[in-house]
Amino acid sequence: MPRRRFHQTYQLAQQIGCFDEYPAISEGVDPQANISRSDRIQPFHLICEKDTMIVLMSGAAKVEFRDSSVNYINGTPGEMIYVPARTPHRVVPSEETIQYRYKAEHAGLEAVAWYCEKCSSEVARVTWDTAEELPQQAYLRSTEAFNSDAEMRTCSNCGEIHPPVDTTGNRWQEIVDELTSETDDDDDW
């Protein structure tokens, strides 16, 4: 089914899972708007090659930054939180949120990273090209790898072994299936 040109945010949010980054507008629009809902800490820090903007539609959350002069920004409905290119960040809700992430239609490289809670060193990072792999597919692949590999979860700096991350509540595989079926349908022309 092709993407719609417009969605009602709160109706769409009822169908969205945690950190789904579901594309909410049709292709060909730059920047793209991606919607997520969250009631728990994002399971990784996201790193985008290009600048992005997070807009909180409901709830309250802190956006934590790494490798930045800003450690975090607290957000409430209507807040627009600018995320500079290549800055690791994650959303930490204090209550359930609905948020949009605006990013370039051709977003380039993206990565997910995990940081040691004990010494703050980077524990692991997985990078992909959004022209070759959907973000949701990469989120799923990366978190499955992280969760299944104790060596990947071990901090090389202090030796702390991190527990698997919680990925419940997302719809990444469903979104991949939906978006790749759209591409397959387009090939039938």
Image (tube, rainbow, N blue to C red):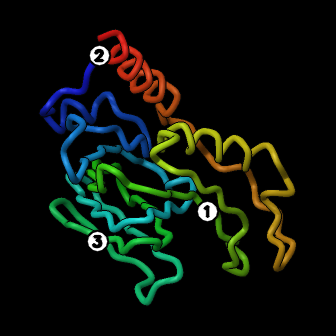
Say which residue appears at 65% left-offset and 46% top-offset: 143
Amino acid type assigned to the residue bearing label 1 in the image: Ala
N-terminal of the pair, mark 2 or mark 3, is: 2
The secondary structure type at the circle numbered 1 is: strand
N-terminal of the pair, mark 3 or mark 1, is: 3
Amino acid type assigned to the residue bearing label 2 in the image: Met
Q: CA distance from mark 2 to mark 3?
A: 32 Å
User: Closer to the camera, 10 or 35?
Assistant: 35
Image: 110 above or below 13:
below
Q: Please rate how many residues cluster around mark 2, counting C-alpha atoms within 10 Å: few if below 14, some from 14 to 19, many from 20.
A: few
Q: Which residue is mark 3?
A: 82
Frontmost of labels 2 and 3 is 2
Say which residue appears at 34% left-offset and 76% top-offset: 73
Q: Which residue is mark 1?
A: 113
Say which residue appears at 65% left-offset and 69% top-offset: 115
Q: Position of residue 184 (x, y in %)?
A: 41, 17
Circle on res. 1: 2
User: Closer to the camera, 79 or 141?
Assistant: 141
Quadrant of residue 74 in the image?
bottom left
User: Closer to the camera, 73 or 96?
Assistant: 73
